[in-house]
Structures are given as structure tokens and as C-alpha cells.
Image (spheres, rainbow, N blue to C red):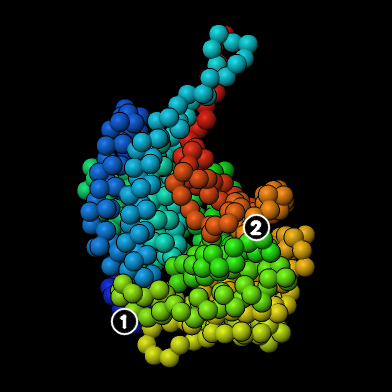
Amino acid sequence: MSLKSVNPATGETIQTYEPTSDADIDKALTQAESYCASLRRTDFASRAEKMRKAADILEQDKDRWAKLMTSEMGKTITAARAEAEKCAWACRFYADNAESFLADEAIEADKSKSFVRHLPLGPVLAVMPWNFPFWQVIRFAAPALMAGNAGVLKHASNVSGCALAIEEIFKKAGFEDGAFTTLLIGSDRVERVLKDDRIKAATLTGSEPAGSAVAGTAGAEIKKTVLELGGSDAFIVMPSADLEKAAEIGVKARTINNGQSCIASKRFIVHEDVYEDYKALFLEKLQALKVGDPMDGDTDIGPLVSEKAREDIHAQVFDSIEAGAVRTWGAEVMDGPGAFYRPGILEEISPGSPAYDDEIFAPVALFFRAVNLDRAIALANDHRYGLSSVIWTKDEAEQEQAIERLQAGATFINDMTASDPRLPFGGVKKSGYGRELAQDGIREFVNRKTVAAG
């Protein structure tokens, strides 16, 4: 069955792609294995030169990559350009820092010398989602390639154009055949690739069921995995917060990428003393956003990724309202072509409803009252996901409590969650395990080999 890219703003088919054949998969894995063997004779400087060239290509042709991202998954053209620029930043970051991140680590022991050396594992399978079609891939590929591994990409089927473009970028940058390969395959063929002995590890960003399936297969094969899964991040607002700024940043945190981000703040837990004031400020700024053509530079929010995604989101909203939630404003299907969904707010959300228990992957803010910080943290932790978290407070004791007690892979203070090549990224609980980015990310797929001499 062919793979298809559909423009979510219009519903029109952009292009269809023939899946990679079994023979071509076999060829790709052989090339990846051969590339990794040859890399043992190269040094960091030669890899860094190519990685910097990849950064240049990402930056110089950012308008081309941005239009591709926007047409395939609907993010605004402004956000898409920023994504290409961020990818270039990550490539340069690892080109500059990989050697020091993977330098030998001396260890004091009863030996003439003892240290840890970091050696590549080999080809790594990356199963990636559509919502950040370049960034999710590059934040894996840049450290993996700089460590001496090969990348084998299975991207989301609706962004096949982006998947092929990323392979093109690495080839143009001078990386040899096998360094980075895109496989145009459906999820039903992932297991076969993952079980192949030439694949040494896997990383997945995506849904909880997809992560469970990949982890299960990899576990049976005794292969290392890194998982970055769902999130329903809490955004706590306490009375000492700058409410105007917290509302401005809160709206941005909820609506980034048309609301389709795992680290978007979704649950706004507000102290009862400032609840109404904060909600009013948030709603005012939310209503001012322009929803429309994602190719228009003035648009703030584009469509959801597909009409099917919009149907699923609206069913979650409807079921939550049936369970007692109040629709304060918006959170509804918009008329006309495309998968547009009006941003909105739900309040009075009941446990057991989708808005309380699940992830709402759309620009719908979920509001909760809290009588104090203890209650706010309890609400924040009352979820199976633990990706990131935010607290707005000027009180240093409250900040420290949030750092210690929020069950999440990160806590941002008086700011919104954002990924950064310099900061480790990942979650706890059902949000996954392992870390991407920073030094942690490049060390996930290496053999930390102990060396000791008598």
C-alpha cells in the first residue's frame, strides 16, 4: 500500500510514495552496518565537518524545508522556519561538543590505569512522529552520527517528504551511504526491522502504545531503547506570579505547534486566589490569536494534522463535557475546508474523563483550581504521564518544593517548557525513559567500556 501526504489545511493529497521494498530494506541495513565498521577508522573532526555542512544546508534552505513541513503537517510557516534553524543549532552543537562529551573518563582505582571509553553501538533505528518532522529526527541523528553510529529512520507516513529531505541533507553534507537512511514503511513493518541483528538499538518518539510495542520487541531482542512518549504537562500558577506574563507565556505554551506538542502545557493548575484573574487574562490572549492558513506569516495557529485527528480530539472534548466539564470558550470544530479546530478552555474537569486522564493533542487548555501548593502538586502528579512541568511563583520555597515534588523529567520556573540542545530532555512514568539532547543524549547509544590495566 502506498504512503500518502495530505495537506491538512486543504485536505488535498500532496504526493504518494511507494513503500521501501524488503530487498531495499536489506540493502539499507547492510550499508548501515558497513558504514559503522568504516567509521571506526575516522575521527571526530571529519564527522564534525560534515555535521556543520548539514547545519549550513538546513539554514540556507530553511524556506524550502519550512514549506515542506507546513504543507505536510500544518504547522505555521513561521514555526517551521524556526524548526529548521533549531535543527541547524543542534547539528553545530554536537559538531562542537561530541568529542568532549565522549572523551575518556579517568577513574581512580587500584590499577596502573583505569578509565571508561565511549564506543559506538552501530545502526540505530529511529521511529519518529509527524508533529516536529525535522526536529525530532535531527535531535536523534546529530548525536548518533557524531558518536559514530548510523541512523535508520522510520518516519510517520504522512511526512514522507520530510523524511526523504532529511536523508538528502545528510548526503549533501558529505555523509557516506549508510550513515543515515530513510525507510518508507508502515508501522506494521517496524518489528521486522527492529529484530534484524544489524540494528543494535532503537529510539522512539510517539504514542504510548507505539512505545510499548517497540520496547517489547527490543526487550525480547535485548536491545537498548530510548522512549519519549505522551505528556499532559502541568502549568502551576501561584499568587506571587506575574499574572500578565504567565498568561502570555501560558497561551504560547498551550498553542505551540497548533497545540500538538508532547511538551505543550496542557493542565493549568491555578491557585484559587488568582484563578479568575488569570483565566480572564489567558482567555483574552487566546481569543486574540489568528487561526488560518499556515502559509500566511501572520497566522498564529494552523490546522490539526488531519481530519481524523480533529474527530478524535473533538470526541475527547465532547466526552469530557458529558462527564461534567464546562466549555468556557472555543474547543470546537471550525467550518470550512481543512482540519481547523478553534482553541479553547475547559473547566470543572472530572476524574475519569478524557480531559483529566488522557492527553489532549490540540490547543485546548484544561483549567483546575487549587487551594494551595500542596493541592496543586497533587493534581499535577495525578496523571500517568510525567514529561515536563512548569511553575510560576516568585517564592523560592515554592520553587524548591516544585523541583523536589513534581513527578516529571523537567521543571521550568517562570517560563515555558522548551527543548534545547544544551539541556537533557525526557520523561518519567508513562512518558518514557532515557534522555535526548545534551551530553546525556549522545551517551544513550554508546558502549561505556571499562578499561583497566594491572
For the point 36% across and 36% down, which residue is it? 96
Q: Is residue 435 visible?
A: yes
Q: Residue at the location (35% across, 59% down)?
A: 82
Q: Label 1 belongs to which residue?
A: 12
Three-letter residue code for mark 1: Glu
Q: Is residue 170 left or right of residue 340?
A: left
Question: In the image shown, does 248 or 446 lie closer to the viewer?
Answer: 248
The x, y position of residue 2, in whole percent, is 33, 71
Q: Position of residue 381 (x, y in %)?
A: 71, 60
In front: label 2 or label 1: 2
Q: Nearer the viewer, residue 170 or 93?
A: 93
Q: Which mark is residue 393?
A: 2
Measuring 39% from the left and 90% from the top, which residue is drawn there?
336
User: Disc 2 to disc 1, how far (Cα)?
Assistant: 46 Å
User: In the displayed structure, would residue 195 be above or below residue 1?
Assistant: above
Image location (x, y in percent) of residue 302:
40, 76
Circle 1 SS class: loop
Q: Earlier in the sequence, mark 2 or mark 1?
A: 1
